[in-house]
Amino acid sequence: MSTRLLPWWLLGGLILAQICYPLTSGDLRAGLTVATVLIGVVLSVSHALLTRGRRAALALVGAATLGGFAVEAIGVATGFPFGTYDYSGELGPKILGVPLIIPLAWTWMAWPAWLAAVRVTRARLPRILLAAAGLAAWDLFLDPQMVAEGYWRWHDPVPALPGVPGIPISNYLGWLGFALLLMTALSATSRVTEPAPTDTPMLALWLWTYASSVLAHAVFLDLPASAAWGGVVMGAAVLPLIARLRRPARTLV
């Protein structure tokens, strides 16, 4: 298989797993959740390595995987910065109370969020803010879906967003805070500051994640409020990319 086509094959496998998710239940659904994250992290890390080199791949793993595990372990132990919560045993083995799959999910989605922001703007601070906002907004889909499945639970889930019970607002604020740190670290260490034609599969992943999440929550998962919240808030981070892709290629601002 050509390395040029590898990201597209992985993206196809990920999309297939996500399409199958609402059609399953129980252990099979949990298995698809884990499989989706594993495919996603291989997609993001391999894309970083193949298109930007070892430095970018190591920067992604350091900021998102190791950083994600650290913040989750602190969160489970202390309740900061997300609120007090714990994980069930359905997502596989845990270390310090954190399923090993969880920091991989941070890694999977951090890379397309960063590359989308790189495509939109050259300015460092707006790029970090846009990437962090997009990554944090993704949790408006992720947490309601995973809590509904019983993969984790909040001990004190108030105050919550209207229509999305069971998840405290502090969780979303914690996501935003850590996403800002993650993107700042990724900006400083990866040295990925220019868009490239080879970014297309990751931008497709970013747009697919948004559109499919709105559809799945609204139609298949019976989570209309999270479809609305995520649709609006993540949409604000995705729309600049759509607008950028629709314009003829020229110097970024």
Image (tube, rainbow, N blue to C red):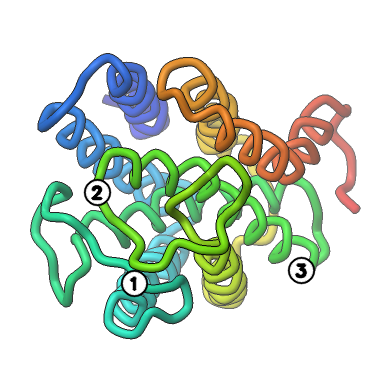
Percent from the top left, x then y, of residue 171?
50, 64
Q: Quadrant of residue 135?
A: bottom right
Q: In the image, is 12 to the left or to the right of 173?
A: left
Q: In the image, is 26 to the left or to the right of 149?
A: left
Residue type at numbered disc 3: Arg
Residue type at numbered disc 2: Tyr
Task: Evaluate if marks 3 and 1 touch, with contact meaning CB atoms under 8 Å apart.
Answer: no
Q: Residues within 10 Å of mark 1 (few under 14, many from 20)?
A: many
Residue depth check, mark 3 versus mark 2: number of the one nearer the observer? 2
Q: In the image, is 75 to the left or to the right of 191?
A: left
For disc 3, the marked residue is: 124
Residue type at numbered disc 1: Glu
For disc 2, the marked residue is: 151
| 159 shown above or below 81 | above
Percent from the top left, x then y, of residue 245?
77, 30
Residue depth check, mark 2 versus mark 1: number of the one nearer the observer? 2
Q: Earlier in the sequence, mark 3 or mark 1?
A: 1
Q: Measuring 44% from the left and 43% from the top, which residue is drawn there?
A: 144
Which numbered disc covers residue 72? 1
Q: In the image, is 59 to the left or to the right of 120?
A: left
Pick the front one: 224 or 137? 224
Q: Secondary structure at mark 1?
A: helix
Percent from the top left, x then y, of residue 223?
48, 30
Quarter holding the N terminus is top left
Pick the front one: 232 or 131? 232
